[in-house]
Structures are given as structure tokens and as C-alpha cells.
Image: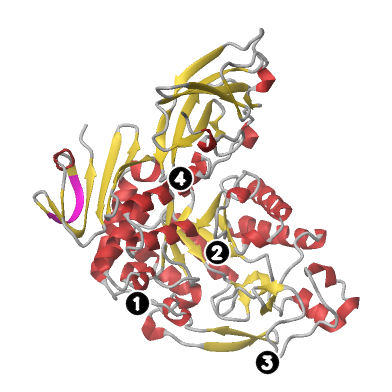
Amino acid sequence: MINRQAIYHKPLSNYAFALDESTLIIRLRTARNDVDCVYLFFGDTAYQGNPVKCSFIEMKVVRQDKYFDYYEATIKNAYRRTVYYFNIEDKDESLIYYSDVFSDKVSDMRNDLYKFPYIRREDIVDTPEWLKDAVIYNIFPDSFISFDKSNKKEISHHGLQIKSNHGGNLREIISNLDYIQDLGCNTIYLNPIFTGGEYHKYDVINYKEIDPLLGTNETFKELVEKSHARNMKVIIDGVFNHSGWNFFAFLDVLKNQENSKYKDWYYELNFPVKRPTEKEKQPTYACFAYEKRMPKLNTSNPEVIDYFMDVCRYWIKEYNIDGWRLDVADEVNLDFWRKFKETAVSINPEIVLIGEVWQDATYFLDGSMFNSTMNYDFLKHAKAFFTGSIDAYDFDARVTNMLIRYRENLNYGQLNLLDSHDVPRFLSVINGNKDIYKLSIIFLLTNVGAPSIFYGDEQSFTGVLESEYRRPMNYLNDIYMFNFFKEIITLRNQYISLRRGSFTTLRASKNEGLYIYKRKFKDESIIIVLNNSNQSITMDDYLLRNRILSKSGLDYKQLSSYGYVIFKESR
């Protein structure tokens, strides 16, 4: 008997979506290894006659996890309006499945069937093409300065105190564009650069001014122009969930209290509003994570929306930025983000909007808000696998979940990361083992999505505490690791299959760390073998017949512990 409880399909979701105006992707989930075959029947909703005349194609298993098979079919030259249903078979029975109902025959009524109402070009969800080819270099500006030049500063700016911790600045970034480009990165993502009180600049004081400890607006324009001259993109951090407590609107609230014309700019105020003393842990107003210096904005207020849409336009129009990374995106109301995207794409249709969402971001990726999110699940699953907490079989199940949960178009622009300004360095997480570190970097740079490298990763930076993982830059800390990063990034940039190709698991061993997968684009295929294990393994002959692009630990047929091989598959 077919396991009916495991079967799942949802129209107009990641289970049924348009890749373009003539291509539909339809998916169906079944229990793992439970059915023999699945057929997709589909027809023109507007067919002149009854019942609708249908064609059919056999669906293929494109993903497996521990519990389910994921079947997929691509309908090319699709009807604008499509009705469809599934025929699910095993050796004992044949089921018809439509509208979440199992039947032994198909309804003659087309409105009973699953339906893709209309392929509208405006509703096709996708990621700007350039992000799919991006290798991102994430810079924490205050820290991006040579360790021997590190210099803590505090100055008065328009009567307000602003701080730096290490003294990194935009001029230092401009001076090291050669370094970043030599590494192979083609996109720079900057953590906050607007004027803020603390060194991290997430407590913004002025949204239209570069923090004077980082540079000037003209310095930033120079950075963008010189990056663009190298065909490099620039993404900046947008902090709109909260302001700093020295932002003009909050200062007015502190001064005028309930009579302030800006009192409705903040989400929740309890009067009298005052800054907590050092002994008072929690403020009497809503803020970011109980951080008293960051009062939470009321982003549903029309005045607040208008103000920040002007900020959005300003940096795109006047400075030609290529994207925004949007801080605390899942705590801001959705209509704000919809308006933000509408504003941004009206100036630059290729603008990238990356939401900071630490969990499944399906809610935000319907096409009306973001075209990418920070994929912290990538970090979570990589941490589990490369620390040995899970085997390759379990890891592959988690990779499958990441690839199946969004519409296919969006996977290629998800910002994959192992490090950021908010988490301990991955090399510290794996106890400084550089052989395992190399495996994790290979997976980062050969997986589906846009890889993000946090400054210093390429120099084997470590750190568990904030003061450690945000340390000053050292361009000569580990030249060997720099060259390794450069080698794998070069492969990614050279082979389109590593950027745009499909992902197929070839082997994911139970109770072992051997993980083999293939990236394929048209006739080009790259096979990656990762031996995340303290035991050597014997390579299959069919793999060794292919051209080796990169390797470590391969001796004839034996692949040593924590070794790897990257092949270009022979035709």
C-alpha cells in the first residue's frame, strides 16, 4: 500500500512555480522508496471541451532525505493556464491525486483539479543574474585595518560621541581592492557604514552620512566607482528595524516626551521616556534585543516609511550601490519591505535585497520583498557535519531540505555563509583543524547559492568571543590558506556548473563522512568528493577516469582522511 500520509503537494508554492513565462516546475513528495513511479498529467485550463485533454510526463526523483522522496517535472512550453493531477503507482495499486484528494479516477470537472491559474511575468520569482555569479567578501569596516595600525578612537561629532574600536575605514578598503580581487571575490558586502555611536554602527544616528571615523560620503562614492571599474558589486547594510538613541527623532522624544511630533515613529514608548542608567538592564521602550541604545522604529507609520524610502533612493541613486543587506528583517512589518523593494527596483531593477533571516525564509521570498536571505541554516548544518555530530547521510538530508524549501530560481542567490560578524569563527568551531576547514570551504564554494567569505576567513582567522572574531585584519596570517581559497574560487568562477548547475547527490554514507555530489550545467559536470572522516577510503574507478581539477590526500585509489578531490567529468 502506498503511504498516503507522506504524499504532499501545495499549488503556488515551492511545489508549483514558474521558472519563466513558458516553464513550470511541479513537485510531489512521497515516502522514501515507497512508490514505483509518478506521472504528471497536465492540460490547458481554457481547453474548449470537457473533460480537459491532458498530456503526461514521468516525474523524476530529484532529491531524497531520510524520510521522503521529492519528485519533480518540468513542463516546457507550458500553457498560460494549467490544470494538473498526479498518477502515483506501485506494484500493488495506482492512485489519482488532485486537490489533496485520493481517487481511483479523474474528475471530469476541471475546477476539481490542481491549478496554476496564470503565468504572469510580474509574479515570477527570481534573483538578479549577477548575484548567482557572486563570490561575496563581507567586511566589518571598523576591523578592516592591519593589526599593526589598530587604533581605538572616540570623537565628538555635532555634539555627539562616536567610537571606533580598531580604526578600520573605507580608505583602507579602497587600498586593498587589489587584495580582494586577487582572492577572486567580485562583490563586497559592508556591515553598517552610516554614522553611529558605537564601533559596530548598528545604532544609526544619521542615515545619509558616512560615519566620519570610516570616511566621508565622497570616499564611499570613490569606493563604489573603483569597485565598479573592476566589475565588482557593492552591497551595504540597511538598519531600519531600529535607530540609535541619538537619532534626531528619538532625541526629540526624549526632549518633548508626549508632545514630540516623532512619538509615533517608535513602536512602543512608555512615558516618561528616559535613557536607562547603567544599572537598569531594560529600557521602558521597545528596542532591538533589549539593547537600550537601539529603540525600535514603528515601520508601519507612513512618515517613517516615507523617510526610509528616501534613504533607500538616496544611496541607490546618488551612490549607485548594487544591493542592500537588511538587518533584523524578520522583525519589520512586511508592507515596509514591499514598499522598500518597490522603491529600490524602480531605480535599479537589478538591485539585490538580502534579508537577515536566521530560519526558513519562505515567508519573505514570495517575490514581493527580498530576492535573497542570509542562509544561516547552511552554517548550522555545516557545523553539525564538519564537527562530526552527524554523518554524511544526515547531512545530505539537511542539504536536501535547503534545496527543496524554496523555488529553484531563488536557491542560486541565497547568501551561504560559515562566518559573519555575529558568530564565532568556523575554524574555532572545528577546533582549528585546517584539513576539515578546507573541506567546509570547498562545500561553501561549490554548493548552490552565493558564497560569502567574512574578512580574514582566507587568512585562517579564529575567534569565539566578539572581540576575537572581529579582530583587525592580517593580510599575511596564512598565505597557504589564502592561496587555497583563491584556487577554489578560481574553479567556481571558471566553471559555470559550480554557479548555475543542478545539484545531485552521488553518495552520502551512513555512519561515515564520505560525501560525493555533482554540479551539472548543460554538458558540463563537476564532481566533488569530500572525505570528512578520520579513515581513508578507496575511490571508485569511474571517478578516477575523470580529470582532476584539485585534490588533497589522493594516493592512487586511496583518499586519505579529510582528503578531497574535485573532478571535471569526462563526456
Residue range in magenta is 548-554
Q: Which mark is residue 440?
A: none
Image position, residue 192 (x, y; %): 57, 70
- Reading the chain from its start, which is encountered first: label 2 or label 4? 2
Q: Check disc 4: other Cα within 10 Å, few if <14, some if 14-19, many if 20+.
A: some
How many angstroms separate mark 2 from mark 4 (CA)? 37 Å
The reply to whether residue 412 is in sight is no
Nearer mark to the viewer, of 3 and 2:
3
Q: Name the secondary structure under disc 3.
A: loop
Q: Check disc 1: other Cα within 10 Å, few if <14, some if 14-19, many if 20+.
A: some
The residue that label 1 is drawn on is: 474
Q: Name the foreground residue: 321 vs 238.
A: 238
How many angstroms separate mark 1 from mark 2 (CA)? 26 Å
How many angstroms separate mark 4 from mark 1 (CA)? 35 Å
The residue that label 3 is drawn on is: 279
The residue that label 2 is drawn on is: 221
Nearer mark to the viewer, of 1 and 3:
3
Three-letter amino acid code of the residue under disc 2: Lys
- Find the residue positioned furthest to the top: 49
The residue that label 4 is drawn on is: 403
Q: Quadrant of the C terminus?
A: top left
Q: Name the foreground residue: 94 vs 217.
A: 94
Residue 177 in the figure: left or right of residue 372: left
